[in-house]
Amino acid sequence: MINFFDTANIYSVGRSEEITGELLKDSRDDVIIATKVFFSSSGVRTRGIPNQIGLSRKIIRREIRESLKRLNMDYIDLYQIHRLDPMPIEEILRSLNHLINEGKVLHIGASSMFAWQFAKSLWIAEKYGLEPFRTMQNHYNLIYREEEREMMPLCKDQGIGVIPWSPLARGFLSGRYSRLNEPDSPRVRSDPNLKKRYFHPTDFDVLEAVVELAKNKGVSPAQIALAWMFSKDFVSSLILGTTKVNHVEQAVEALDIKLSNEEIKSIEDPYKPHTIIGHS
């Protein structure tokens, strides 16, 4: 059963929250609703505009009010900061803790930051007796594994739930692309970050290993990439976006695909270190 649904105030300028709320209104007690705050629900993404994006108390209170209204719910299970604001982390945590005390939020989570920043937030919460971030939503997949160096060990040690975003590397791990051809798809044309983050020669080394293993097991490359994610004991759930019903069905089927240690090694070995991406 799929019972975890993640959205954000900025997705489709708030429309995503409205659809999520409408879809799940009759199942509220059976599901976990997660949304995010940092970017403005008005669609503004430019930093430096006063009271538009960030994690000031004013912005957090405005955005929780609007998110609850769009979701048509009286509380959110998991309220996550979409990015880290340069303001003192204690102030951010206190603002979020007020929402917990008011019953508007059950738990808080973080996303997309360096491990030292997340460790500092956990220390600050403990020091001041505040409710800490309970989850980390970070950039992690077979093509980008830099989070294994510090963030994943930190989360595992501290009992933090890990909810990686982009488990299929924005569709790169679906198997539709080849190093022999110039990439072209609706996603490539509409998503400048796809070619910017992936499509390096060493990324294709990983992709080709995934495609080969998928052929041997009679499943899709995307299912292999997801099965690999599910094999990691520090991963609690995944943030998977789909446009077709069969994509959801294949993702659920991937839960039953078990990879041996040798198979995992075959798709991990081609990996080469990347520069840090996904924090901005």
Image (spheres, grey):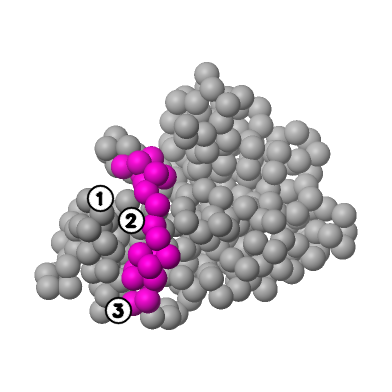
Q: Is residue 209 above or below residue 72?
A: below
Residue 216 seen in the figure:
yes
Q: Residue at x 40, y 52 (%)?
A: 258
Decide whether residue 247 is among the magenta residues: no
CB within 8 Å, label 1 to label 2: yes
Q: Which residue is mark 2?
A: 224
Residue situated in front as seen by the camera: 57 or 220: 220
Q: Is residue 246 above or below residue 173?
A: above
Q: Which residue is mark 3?
A: 202
Other-residue count near label 1 (Cα within 10 Å), few / some / many at <14 / 14–19 / ≥20:
some
Magenta stretch secondary structure, dominant: helix
**Residue type, numbered disc 2:** Ile
Residue 85 point in image, percent of width and height: 64, 63
Q: Residue at x 65, y 61 (%)?
A: 156
**Circle 3: element type:** helix
Residue 42 seen in the figure:
no
Q: Quadrant of residue 261?
A: bottom left
Residue 151 point in image, percent of width and height: 60, 68
Residue situated in front as seen by the camera: 171 or 187: 171
Mark 2 vs mark 3, foreground winner is 2
Q: Earlier in the sequence, mark 3 or mark 1?
A: 3
Find the magenta span and give its range.
250-271
Q: Earlier in the sequence, mark 2 or mark 3?
A: 3
